[in-house]
Image: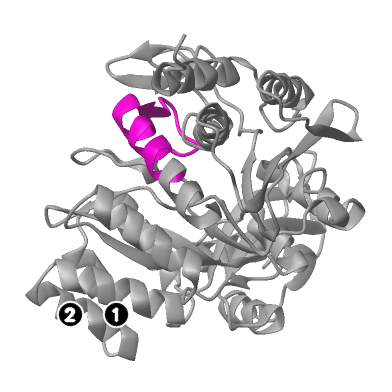
Amino acid sequence: MVFDGNEEIIKVLSELIKIDTSNPPGNEKEAIEYCARYLKSYGVEPIVIESAPKRANLVARVKGTGRTPFLLTGHIDTVPADEANWRFPPFSGVLEDGAIWGRGALDMKHFVAMLLVVIRELIAENFKTKRDIIIVITCDEEEGSQCGARFLVEKHPDLIDAEFGLGEVGGFSMSVAGKRLYPVMTSEKGFAWLKITAEGESGHGSMPVFRNSIGRLGLAAWRLSNILLPLHITKDASNFLRNLGSIIGYKGKLLRLLEYNLTNELVVEKLVTNQSQKKYFKSLLRNTASPTLFFAGDKINVIPKVAYLKVDLRYLPGISLEEAVDEVREVVGDDVNIEVESYGEPVQFESNTELFKLIKDVVEREDRFSIVTPYMSPGFTDAKYFSKKNITVYGFTPLRFEGDFSYVSLIHSENERVPVSALLWGKHVLKQIIKEYCG
């Protein structure tokens, strides 16, 4: 019987979504074992590596004939899902209205399913790879990769010896001025989890204390929520603006002004109408600091002496952690204390490579009149840790959307889903890239 990869990828993705890998707590081992069984079913022998109870990663290798190995990587964990606002249950993996619904459909079980099925297709076609193809499926990406990519890089570096690879987040089409733009992640921001502490005089709630700890910390949170950090233009931001500007005509010249700090938020506000794209633009152009958690007091009638705030700081390539923290300090003032609890450095990869050129050629061949551009991810990916092994991991999990389907707004949101047409197109593109890069 002829193997039907199109039917198979729908089945595999649906089954992966049905396995709840919400992180926290994670419990990814069941899904990893599913992937291991699937690989074994067509002769690929994986290694399953537990990093903690119920936490596991998978590494498998399809042997080539000697050229440098090629990495395909995806994480199997997802953020949690509250079923209340979903059209279909978030772990149903149901196929409805031409899409597969469920948590992880976009982030990023679709790519895990894609790589599993594409490798099976290639083996069924007796494809002879000149490169080892290394498949790495990780846990714990959503909570910082301590049990996932970081664990593998630090504890099992010998298993991951590639020079180039593909992972998240990029390769999804964006509709701009009637054309499709495909951003490929070539850099990502660094992150730092900050603890901002304010101290003041404590006392009884009936006798107010001037500038108490909660008031001072509340003012710091308000400032971070309302005052933008300074504008910075990175190499990838410049390339992205240039490519976007080439699509949207005369308005593109106004976007290019951002490169030279000659304008401000008004350009983004006026020229970018899609709200998800607008948020991305604002994060592309500067460091960002978002207050996320507030802790103070334990009794209604007691003014606490100490209050603290957790802040999610994301900082651009080319800027040090110290410089980014100083920008936050400039906003919140000197009467609070800032402590860095954990951090990961920015990542920046060169785009002038054989693999990036191949991605561009294949995408523009399979979607005529589209444009492929480097871009920077404002979020965190496993590439941050693979880069420690000098592996260039481009964010490219190809999906072609029709119309105004909003990939960005559905990530981590209710009703996450991937259109079947986008999934099948992406599988085809990934297969072509593997055949041409590894053949």
Magenta range is 411-430
Q: Which numbered disc flags the more N-terminal residue, 2 or 1?
A: 2
Q: Is residue 240 magenta?
A: no
Along the horizontal axis of the image, is 380 left or right of 295?
A: left
* Residue 22 placement: quadrant: top right
Q: Is residue 414 above or below residue 2?
A: below
Residue bearing mark 1: 264
Residue 424 seen by the camera: yes
Compared across the picture, whether 391 is left or right of 122 comes to right
Q: Nearer the viewer, residue 203 or 148?
A: 148
Q: Which residue is under mark 2?
A: 254
Residue 32: x percent and y percent?
73, 27
- At mark 1, the secondary structure is loop
Above or below residue 249? Residue 136 is above
In the image, is 421 to the left or to the right of 160? left
Q: Nearer the viewer, residue 85 or 205?
A: 85
Image position, residue 332 (x, y; %): 60, 74
Q: Which residue is found at the position 38% from the left and 13% from the top? A: 95
Above or below for 114 versus 194: above
